[in-house]
Amino acid sequence: MNNMADKLLRGGDSKNPLNVRPGGTFFKQFVPMSSTRKYDLVTCSRSLFELPDIAARLRTIDILWRKTHSYLLIVEAGSNAGYRLVLEARDYVLELSRRAHEEGESNPTGYVFSPCSHDKFCPRYLDGTNIPCNFEVSYRPFSINRKINALKDRFSYVIIKRGKRNEDVDQQWPRVIQNPSLKKKHVICHLCTKYGTLQELTVTKRRHGKACYSVSKKASWGDLFPVVLPEPELTQATESTDIITENGDDLGNKENIGKEDM
């Protein structure tokens, strides 16, 4: 992997002395143990499967988190096994943050920056469907002799950020966890909310307004849905869910039906 990365950085010809690797790029065979040097972005991509047991995985995650100054990104395959590895790492780092906070360490805390808008246990794991929390990306594989159509791959990921979760509106938006279902005069959106719950939201132009209806039709799997939902116990049914916009308007209120701006 290191050799391939080095070759790519040198323009495809690592033996040509004129192709100099960009400065500030270093390769190491093993993860550095020291936490003195920290990095704004630390990534662990499809590597946890290669470790022999949970002890080795958590030890590696612990080292990576100690070297993280801002963001820790963990990516695995979008299968149930990959999702559970991501969930294992996510919950472990959150537990480390909780303990560090209790012990009064300086800047110890961390929170889930993406895809979750909460730090609670993953509701997808508890919903009984055996469907992992994953997302889909299109890519075009390398081809030498023939044209190959774009393929799709599913992956599970988590981004954990140092610091405390802020109260910005976009940090409260729910995540679209599968492609919305476009029906006649309504759209069904499946969301993971900041309350740590899954919610099926039926959006109509008549009830929620033109702007929200338009957003729901254009939403894609993995997007943030730009609304603030009320707590689940305040709603009577999915169809009657009110939506609060960034400026505080209630799109479920009859007085706000048809507003153009969110």
Image (cartoon, grey):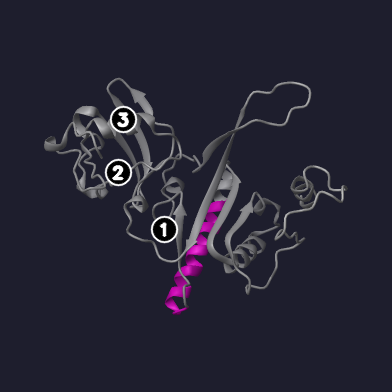
What distance separates the C-alpha of mark 2 from that of mark 1? 19 Å
Identify the mark at residue 227; answer none if there is no mark: 2
Q: What residue type is labelled 2?
A: Val
Q: In this rendering, which labeled residue sits more in front, label 3 or label 1?
A: 3
Identify the mark at residue 196; answer none if there is no mark: none
Mark with earlier residue (2, 1):
1
What distance separates the C-alpha of mark 3 from that of mark 1? 30 Å
Which segment did they paint magenta?
85-105
Q: Which residue bears the numbered disc 3?
A: 214
Is residue 6 placed above or below 251 in the rendered structure? below
Task: Specify whether residue 93 is painted magenta.
Answer: yes
Q: Do residues under tags 3 and 2 come within 8 Å of each other at their CB atoms?
A: no
Residue 123, given in percent of the width and then of the height, sits at 41, 48
Specify few, some or many for label 2: CA neighbours under 10 Å numbering under 14, 14-19, or 20 or more: many
* Secondary structure under the numbered disc 1 in the rendered image: loop
Q: Which amino acid does label 1 sit on?
A: Asp
Mark with earlier residue (3, 1):
1
Is residue 154 placed above or below 57 in the rendered structure? above
Which secondary structure type mostly characterizes the magenta part of the structure?
helix
Of 127 and 215, which appears nearest the observer? Answer: 215
Of 195 and 68, which appears nearest the observer? Answer: 68
Residue at image point 64% right, 60% down: 57
Specify few, some or many for label 1: CA neighbours under 10 Å numbering under 14, 14-19, or 20 or more: some
Residue 219, given in percent of the width and then of the height, sits at 39, 34
Q: Which amino acid does label 3 sit on?
A: Ser
Q: Which residue bears the numbered disc 1?
A: 119
What distance separates the C-alpha of mark 3 from that of mark 2? 13 Å
Residue 149, given in percent of the width and then of the height, sits at 64, 23
